[in-house]
């Protein structure tokens, strides 16, 4: 006999029960699901929504973030955010007192644990809804901390990030619901059966730490934040020092919902820092921290993985990789070039999913417009990028602004890289003047052609508006290089263009061997950079680019433990 857990009553559970059913179903079927409209149109959100959101964002600027003043603080304020578009934000944040804050987080765990998975999930949905109501405010905060263009900031920073949050909530809920509350266990015996009642109790690991990134401060933070929360843990959110405001807004909303729902605000806290403080390393070494979610560069990610292994903390990382495209042949050259140009240009290539290495055989590419040599294909792709980014007013709404000096240095280094690798600059990374923000550094994608033998040029991530056209001896070698470089260096995405079923089958095998997600013949409005919550896994955990995937069972199941008590009956 098996009994499910008795769910404590809570008004939010009644309010959000239909949503919980919807997200369970979407997760199980891997179907399209979105709770939040992705268009910032006034027809969708109302005539005043954009202006109200902008005013709310501007109200933060140049002053302390007072809404978080109730956190345990050491009495100091931190903050060093400067918009990639030029303006200094001037927001200061109360510095978290780590001893008091972590003690408060641990003290809040018992009531949150005892609420049960369904109530926790309902409260998490309410938090996501609360953040969603501030989507325009959040979009401006994401834009001016990450450099994303506004519409992308709205979509990726708001609705798409919120969908990933719901996906994590659903995954965590479903895994917890696999565990029955109680069973009567019976083992046949000669005289009379052995009978025991066994009760199963879900308990959290403790305190989670979410270490945010500069380029996608919400989208990359929400999966870990909500996966830990829904499984009963408290969370300390440590934003990138140049992208604090989006996560401060998120934490403020979460703390208010938790308090309104009868739980301790200390379940979610913000640990802000100024540039160069090294707070992430300090927090990661605290014994109270049992779970770490990280998005960022590989060196610190690898240190976190080692540190976590040393003291038994769970560590989920998304780092860097070599996203690859194999071009064999196409029956839609215009669509292929347009899709690749857009994928290279979107947010100036500052995405962990953006393509970098494009493998093209030296014999060229057969297309619906005739045969193109290797050089001709490169020139046609360069023309497609140039057309796409020719109008500065339109281009900046696709390219955004470069986020840091390293990205700009990568864009500036194309001639040097080409010379060192005996290659050719196919397209310079062109500077684009932003019509509204003169201080923004906007760069269109550049392309360098190199031979496959020059691994020194293309086997490191060159983050930003840089693509490599790599001349191979054959499509077979292209696929071998895709698999080999991803296995060794990692990759979040892979793509193939071919009219041959045999080549497509070989590409699927190469992707499976490398442990990377594959897109085939994308020529329309789906791009390799983009993934859909509830349907596409982001990352695989099967190559060095990431040790986890948003959102599979492995991403949530170890965030809680099951404690058994048993007795004879």
Image (tube, rainbow, N blue to C red):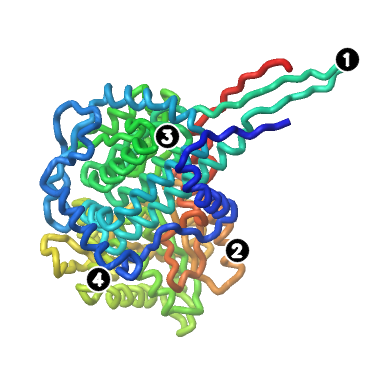
Q: Are marks 1 and 3 in contact (CB under 8 Å)?
A: no
Q: Is residue 343 left or right of residue 543?
A: left
Q: Name which residue lies at 49% across and 41% down.
A: 555
Q: In the rendered view, tell whether residue 129 sits above or below residue 469.
A: above
Disc with the residue nearer the chain's start (4 vs 3): 3
CA separation in Å, label 4 and label 3: 38 Å
Q: Are marks 4 and 3 in contact (CB under 8 Å)?
A: no
Disc marking residue 505: 2
Q: Mark 3 — residue?
A: 315
Disc with the residue nearer the chain's start (2 vs 1): 1
CA separation in Å, label 4 and label 1: 82 Å
Mark 2 surroundings: few (<14), some (14-19) or many (≥20) residues within 10 A: few
Disc with the residue nearer the chain's start (1 vs 3): 1
In this view, the mark in front (4 or 1): 1
Q: Mark 4 — residue?
A: 395
In this view, the mark in front (3 or 2): 3
Disc with the residue nearer the chain's start (3 vs 2): 3
In this view, the mark in front (1 or 3): 1
Disc marking residue 167: none
Quadrant of the image for the N terminus?
A: top right
Q: In the rendered view, tell whether residue 237 sits above or below residue 419.
A: above
CA separation in Å, label 1 and label 3: 50 Å
Disc with the residue nearer the chain's start (4 vs 1): 1
Q: Name which residue lies at 33% across and 30% down.
A: 266
Mark 3 surroundings: few (<14), some (14-19) or many (≥20) residues within 10 A: many
Q: Mark 1 — residue?
A: 191
In this view, the mark in front (4 or 2): 4
Q: Position of residue 251 (x, y in %)?
A: 30, 41
Q: Nearer the viewer, residue 113 or 453?
A: 113
CA separation in Å, label 3 and label 2: 34 Å
CA separation in Å, label 2 and label 1: 60 Å
Q: Nearer the viewer, residue 518 or 212?
A: 212
């Amino acid at each position: 006999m098996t009994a499910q857990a008795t769910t404590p009553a809570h008004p939010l559970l009644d309010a959000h029960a239909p949503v919980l059913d919807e997200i369970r179903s979407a997760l199980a079927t891997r179907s399209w699901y979105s709770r939040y409209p992705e268009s910032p149109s006034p027809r969708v959100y109302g005539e005043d929504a954009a202006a109200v959101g902008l005013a709310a964002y501007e109200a933060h600027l140049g002053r302390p973030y007072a809404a978080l003043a109730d956190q345990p603080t050491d009495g100091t304020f931190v903050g060093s955010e400067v918009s990639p578009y030029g303006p200094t934000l001037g927001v200061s944040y109360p510095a978290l007192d780590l001893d008091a804050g972590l003690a408060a987080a641990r003290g809040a765990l018992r009531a949150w644990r005892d609420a049960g998975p369904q109530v926790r999930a309902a409260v998490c949905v309410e938090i996501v809804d609360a953040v969603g109501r501030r989507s325009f405010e959040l979009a401006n905060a994401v834009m001016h901390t990450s450099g994303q263009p506004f519409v992308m900031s709205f979509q990726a920073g708001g609705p798409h990030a919120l969908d990933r949050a719901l996906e994590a909530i659903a995954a965590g809920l479903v895994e917890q619901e696999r565990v029955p509350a109680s069973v009567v266990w019976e083992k046949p015996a000669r005289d009379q059966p052995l009978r025991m009642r066994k009760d199963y109790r879900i308990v959290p690991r403790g305190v989670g730490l979410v270490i945010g990134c500069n380029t996608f401060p919400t989208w990359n933070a929400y999966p870990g934040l909500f996966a830990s929360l829904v499984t009963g843990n408290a969370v300390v959110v440590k934003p990138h020092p140049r992208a604090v405001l989006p996560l401060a807004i998120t934490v403020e909303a979460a703390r208010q919902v938790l308090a309104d729902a009868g739980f301790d605000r200390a379940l979610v806290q913000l640990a802000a820092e100024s540039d160069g403080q090294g707070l992430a390393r300090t927090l990661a070494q605290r014994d109270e921290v049992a779970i770490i979610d990280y998005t960022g560069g590989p060196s610190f990610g690898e240190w976190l993985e080692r540190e976590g292994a040393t003291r038994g903390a769970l560590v989920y990382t998304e780092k860097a990789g070599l996203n690859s495209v194999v071009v064999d042949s196409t029956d839609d050259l215009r669509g292929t070039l347009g899709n690749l140009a857009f994928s290279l240009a979107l947010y100036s290539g500052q995405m962990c999913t953006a393509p970098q290495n494009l493998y093209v055989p030296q014999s060229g590419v057969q297309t619906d417009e005739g045969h193109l040599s290797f050089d001709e294909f490169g020139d046609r792709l360069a023309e497609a990028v140039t057309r796409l980014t020719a109008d500065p007013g339109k281009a900046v709404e696709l390219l955004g602004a470069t986020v840091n000096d390293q990205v700009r240095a990568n864009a500036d280094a194309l001639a040097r890289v080409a010379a060192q690798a005996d290659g050719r600059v196919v397209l310079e990374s062109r500077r684009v003047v932003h019509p509204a923000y003169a201080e923004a550094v906007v760069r269109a994608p550049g392309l360098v052609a190199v031979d496959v033998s020059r691994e020194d040029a293309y086997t490191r991530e060159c983050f930003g508006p840089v693509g490599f056209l790599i001349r191979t001896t054959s499509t077979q070698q292209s696929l071998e290089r895709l698999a080999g470089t991803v296995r060794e260096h990692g990759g979040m995405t892979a793509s193939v263009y071919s009219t041959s079923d045999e080549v497509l089958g070989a590409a699927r095998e190469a992707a499976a061997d490398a442990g990377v997600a594959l897109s085939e013949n994308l020529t329309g409005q789906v791009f390799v950079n983009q993934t859909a919550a509830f349907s596409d896994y982001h990352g695989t955990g099967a190559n060095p680019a990431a040790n986890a995937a948003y959102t599979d069972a492995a991403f949530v199941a170890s965030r809680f433990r099951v404690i058994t008590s048993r007795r004879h009956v």
